[in-house]
Image (cartoon, rainbow, N blue to C red):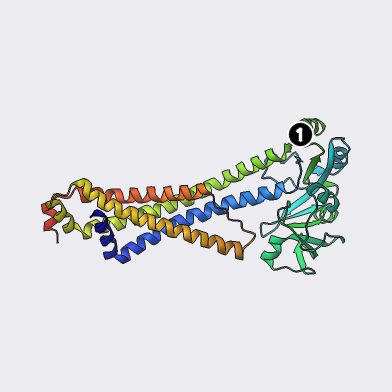
Amino acid sequence: MINRVVWENLCHRPVRTALTVAAIALEACMILLLWGLADGLVEDSSRRKKGIGAHILIRPSASSSPLTSGTGGMSAHYVDLIEALPEVEVAAGSTFKMLNDLTTVTGIEWDKFERMAGRIRFPRGGPFEDPFDIVVDETYAAQKNLALGQTIQALNRDFRLVGITESGKLSRLFVSLATMQELMGWEGKLSQIYVRLKDPRRTGEMIQRLKEMLPEHPVYSMEEFISLFEAQTRGLTGEFMGVIVGIAVSVGFLVVLLSMYTAVVDRTREIGILKALGASPAYIINIFMREAMLMTLGGILVGIGLAYLGKGIIDNRFPLVAVLFLHSHLTWSTAIAVAASFLGALYPTVRAAGQDPIDALAYE
């Protein structure tokens, strides 16, 4: 009986119900997409760092944080010293710089990079040979609609696209290390050094040895560096996410509050009739809370559907923007939407339950 009353009340006011569901859906969709974007950014960056195949990373002395670049802050002669160690399979230095579109161009020695990361697959073209050749990954090429032979501007110079490589290998764009050092005025300088060991089990021992060799430079295992990078990145995005989630919760709270308050006012006489027939305050609360939760459930389902639709559009139209949905995202967005709706419905529901039946029947 009570479920039929709830359903008929919602259907009797379709515009109010639809607007409430839409507002809750927008709340859930906003939270999901922003969380997905934040975690997608972190996961994509971490995956590309893992793709280099190194066991140890050495950074400039000024780069105390994984989020600082320290570009051009290390002497290139360290690479030969490190590679001469019997435990080291290969050591490779690189430089990098952030471009205007927030992608990174990295200067590398291709032979060493391939020894470090393993055989690199080229769907089209091959590695650079001339000083002003450039290689990009598949994701970047798809986003920019690039074809071999095109001219790409980077580092204030024109480069010829000679290869499109698989994604997930350190960077989006690659140029010759010597060319980048010359263009940026970093001759003999590196941004970081990657070290691949013959025996990965000796990583801890080699980190201590490298710290003794280069006491002024931070030395990390790749697992440690990626963990620090993820923690600091999530820390920076956490404050932003907190603000956005707060706005979304406020919207959901106010919409449900207004919707349920309007429902209580519109149905004052109905409440009076129910109470005159013996309905308890708990019965009245049950009706209005079920209405609020049913609209919330509908809004959450629509919001999740919209979020996945948005993810599909972003994946197809903007490949550089990674969106990652986790089970925890769904759980938390659902919990937040339900909590906001419950709080929004609380005051109107309690007000309805506390109405005097005679006053309610006399209401016009």
Question: For the residue carrying disc 1, how many other residues have a C-alpha within 10 Å: few (<14), some (14-19), or many (20+)?
Answer: few
Q: Quadrant of residue 180?
A: bottom right
State the residue in front, 121 or 351: 121
**Drawn side of residue 69 relative to residue 254, left or right:** right
Can residue 288 be spotted in the picture?
A: yes
| 324 vs 207, nearest the viewer | 324
Q: Residue at x 41, y 51 (%)?
A: 337
Residue drawn 34% across and 49% down? 342
Q: Amino acid at mark 1?
A: Arg
Look at the image and tell me in which quarter the C terminus lies.
bottom left
List x then y, in percent, for residue 11.
Answer: 29, 64
Where is residue 16? Give x, y as percent.
Answer: 31, 63
- 108 and 90: which one is in front? 90
Question: From the viewer's perspective, is residue 147 above or below residue 212?
Answer: below
Residue 9 horizontal side relative to residue 148, left or right: left
Q: Which residue is mark 1?
A: 201
Secondary structure category for the residue under label 1: helix
Seen from the viewer's position, the closer of residues 12 and 174 is 12
Residue 323 x %, y %: 58, 55
Give the total number of marks visible in the rendering: 1
In which quadrant of the rendered view does residue 297 lie?
Answer: bottom left
Q: Residue at x 40, y 52 (%)?
A: 250
Residue 150: image location, x then y, percent: 77, 69
Residue 215 visible here: no
- Looking at the rendering, in which quadrant would you find the N terminus? bottom left
